[in-house]
Image (cartoon, coloured by chain):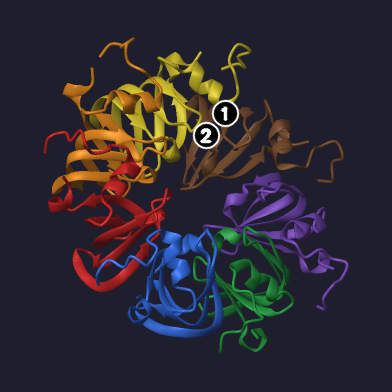
Chain colours: A red, B blue, C green, D purple, E orange, F brown, G yellow
Amino acid sequence: MPKNPDTGNKPLDVLRNSAEKNVLVDVKGNRGYSGILEGNDVYMNLVLRNASEIINGEAKSFHNRILVRGDNVIYVSPSKGDDQ
Amino acid sequence: MPKNPDTGNKPLDVLRNSAEKNVLVDVKGNRGYSGILEGNDVYMNLVLRNASEIINGEAKSFHNRILVRGDNVIYVSPSKGDDQ
Amino acid sequence: MPKNPDTGNKPLDVLRNSAEKNVLVDVKGNRGYSGILEGNDVYMNLVLRNASEIINGEAKSFHNRILVRGDNVIYVSPSKGDDQ
Amino acid sequence: MPKNPDTGNKPLDVLRNSAEKNVLVDVKGNRGYSGILEGNDVYMNLVLRNASEIINGEAKSFHNRILVRGDNVIYVSPSKGDDQ
Amino acid sequence: MPKNPDTGNKPLDVLRNSAEKNVLVDVKGNRGYSGILEGNDVYMNLVLRNASEIINGEAKSFHNRILVRGDNVIYVSPSKGDDQ
Amino acid sequence: MPKNPDTGNKPLDVLRNSAEKNVLVDVKGNRGYSGILEGNDVYMNLVLRNASEIINGEAKSFHNRILVRGDNVIYVSPSKGDDQ
Amino acid sequence: MPKNPDTGNKPLDVLRNSAEKNVLVDVKGNRGYSGILEGNDVYMNLVLRNASEIINGEAKSFHNRILVRGDNVIYVSPSKGDDQ
């Protein structure tokens, strides 16, 4: 993937540019959340829609909407198809 | 669930929009609290009413009212029927 | 328990409304403290009177007065009879 | 112990009222310190005099004077005879 | 490698000087991320492009773009060929 | 040891009064540092001279000078002979 | 080693006085970094040059330049030959 001059490269820009796109959020304790990013704040608190919780690699529960506390986040990765 | 233009998508909006609705609060240490969200503050401290404590997936104790410290929160998920 | 319009629903209101009433304070490390809430500050540091320390579910020691540091608090639950 | 109208009930008042009295300080990691409280600051850093360190319930070492960092404190309990 | 007078030696300068170069980011929990540093902020939140996640020394997953939360960072090491 | 009216009893005073005297610094992870306190700041970062690192009760390494980060400190105890 | 009147004894002075000298940085998780200190900031983030990572006492990897996050630091010790 070449450098994309149209994409912000500051951490919060990555979140803004991922709004309404699929992201994978990895948190402490071998958990992750995969869903559509609805919003965030500067503390990296994140709101996901249509989200699956993934524990030790397996999808465990579905959440129409979920607020994930930023403290626990290890990384946020925009999904491949949506990261342009 | 389609994008809902009437629903705030900032993290604190999700809490405000969940007032007086059922939420599931997951905290560190394999615990959760399920009840009606009465209030919150910007630290994500939460007040629940008619709340069950869930430890390792089992309901353990009932609390008329409980104040959960925000520090420990991993996620807050509005209950399906109430998340519109 | 129906919604109580006379009860504050902000986290610190719950503490203020519980002054001089029995509360159960759960802290990290499988410990809890049950006693009469004498006071608190905005950090959730709590003063209890006539308090029992509960470790792994068993009452272990009695304290005429005890100051519990807010950092460690998981939840504060007003006792059922006192939570009106 | 009845409510004592002459005793402050704010967390830092408990420390101030315990100056020059015996206190038990419980800290993380199954340790405690029992001694005379000489002073404190708002971070709950504490100075004890004639203090014993207690590890897993046994007195282990004696300190003429010891500064305990507030970060680690779980609770401070004035000794029974001194808590009036 | 001799001292390089043209290279900043303040921590944030190292990040700025590594922009668009390969870095290895080691985080807590035996994980690392190797990729091209796109951006950072003062909290050491980092954006990497073409990044591999490395768990216990093995490359595990590939991310077109990934935002790694600064809280978890242990070190950032510019790759050898790029660190001049 | 009687109360010493000439000794400050605020936590930072204990550090100031221990300058150029032997102290034992206990830190998280079953480690300690014993040496002459050269300096400190308000974060309880400490500089020791002629310091031994003590791990699980045994002296392990010697440091001419060592800067111990305050975050990790559990307690600072002036050595008996120097604590007057 | 006698008291050195020409050496600052404040924690950040120790870092400033160690610039371009060998230091050993011990961090949480049984790791250390040994190299030439290029720079630091007030958060104790450190830049080392020609650094070896030491895990459980063994040198594991070499880094031309490495930025170690201050949060994780337990101590910084100037190397013996350089600490005058």
- On screen, residue G51 versus residue C60, left or right, reads left
Mark 1 to mark 2: distance in Å?
A: 6 Å
- On screen, residue E19 versus residue G47, left or right, reads left
Q: Position of residue B47 (x, y in %)?
A: 54, 73
Q: How many marks?
A: 2
Q: Is residue B32 visible?
A: yes
The N terminus of chain A lies in quadrant: top left
Q: Position of residue G7 (x, y in %)?
A: 58, 15
Camera-side residue: A66 or G67?
A66
Amino acid of disc 1: Val
Camera-side residue: G60 or C84?
C84
Residue G25 placement: quadrant: top left
Element under disc 2: strand
What residue is at 49 percent from the left and 39 percent from the top? F54
Q: Position of residue B59 (x, y in %)?
A: 41, 84
Camera-side residue: D64 or D29?
D29
Mark number for residue F47? 1
Q: Are marks 1 and 2 in contact (CB under 8 Å)?
A: yes
Height in image: G80 above or below F13?
Answer: above
Mark number for residue D26? none
Residue C31 placement: quadrant: bottom right
Residue holding disc 2: F68
Camera-side residue: A7 or F35?
A7
The C terminus of chain A lies in quadrant: top left
Amino acid of disc 2: Val
Q: Is residue C53 visible?
A: no
Q: Position of residue E73 (x, y in %)?
A: 34, 41
Residue E19 placement: quadrant: top left
What residue is at 53 percent from the left and 42 percent from the top? F71
Height in image: G44 above or below B10?
Answer: above
Give the letter of the chain under mark 2.
F
